[in-house]
Amino acid sequence: MGQPAISVLGLSKRFGPMTALDDVRFDVAPGTVFGLLGPNGAGKTTMIRILTTIIRPTAGRAEVLGHDVVRQAAAVRRLIGLAGQFAAVDPNLTGRENLRLIGRLTHAPRGQVRPRAAEMLARFRLEDAADRPVRTYSGGMRRRLDIAAALVAEPPVLFLDEPTTGLDPQSRIALWDLIRTLVDDGTTVLLTTQYLEEADRLAARVVVVNEGRIIADDTPAALKARLGDTVIELAMGDHRRASRASELLADRLGAAPQQEGDLLRIGAQDSARLLIDILRVTDEAGLAPRRVAVREPSLDDVFLSLTGHRTRTPEPAAHSAEAQS
């Protein structure tokens, strides 16, 4: 294999007494989408800020296309594009002026700035609003413009920090298609997200981060395979019945369900046989489920099995803004 597009070697970051990242290590292959998954407060945005030279790590090092993000920060900046969680465009300029300004700031050839801005406006369906001040845009329109600005210079490495936040379903799908096109053309994309479907559709490899540490690193398919071919969901009606059913199934069938409120989830290789056994055992005990579903496992199931909670959790209170997400 060739040199990784992004290499993270034991990165740690502390904000006072709080550890935002703890000895994180991974490589990103060139021309792929790499997914960084985790809830708010997991350390995702801190990682992005280090890799894009905005902040320095407390320990460890990282490289982008062979350039150290601390010692060769200027070189790294010439090779990357970044769309952060919040739109960074100038509200007093028009959409077209914002994109042209970014083109000049990134030293794009003068003859390419105007056509490139026009191309981005068309790709993100902003042509009708191109000559309006950005302060008149909706939140979703600002988000699309911000992502377009990150692509003006056609960077070989693109960082997208929760890029589809605030986008409607149609715009989200359009952005997914654009990301696939960029990767087909050789761009490397590091994507942070809380949308499990997004990582599943786009990422060749996924790292799951929780409380600043990597808890899983594999392909989406391999991560989902940890749960078996299917997931059986049992809606028990209330928390007490779910707890009793969980203990019963663990004791009688050796199947240890994950419990979330009144809902039990069980990964299975032979779902038909296990489901029959589950229904028999629970019915005999007077704990027949109110609803049963059998489906393919999702990355959300994987995260729940690894951490005990879903990816979307309430934001932690009063930490440094740099440590959030």
Image (spheres, rainbow, N blue to C red):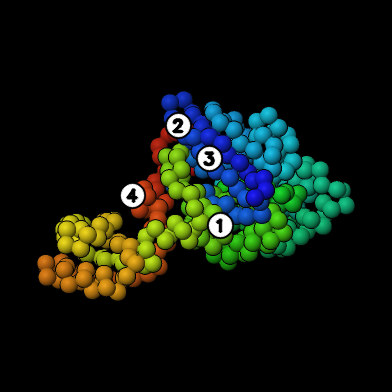
Provide the secondary structure element on which disc 2 rests: strand
Q: How far apart are marks 4 and 2 (CA)?
A: 21 Å
Do the residues under discs 1 and 2 have CB atoms within 8 angstroms?
A: no
Residue at image mark 1: 203
Q: Which residue is drawn at 40% across and 64% down?
A: 297
- Tell me if residue 141 comes above or below residue 82 in the rendering: below
Residue at image mark 2: 19
Provide the secondary structure element on which disc 3 rests: strand
Residue at image mark 3: 25
Between residues 121 and 213, which one lies in front from this camera angle?
213
The spot of residue 307 in percent (x, y) is 36, 48
Q: Residues within 10 Å of mark 4 (few under 14, many from 20)?
A: few
- Dot label at residue 308: 4
Q: How far apart are marks 3 and 1 (CA)?
A: 18 Å
Q: How far apart are marks 3 and 4 (CA)?
A: 23 Å
Between residues 111 and 48, which one lies in front from this camera angle?
48
Q: How crowded is mark 1: few (under 14 residues within 10 Å), some or many (20 or more)?
A: many
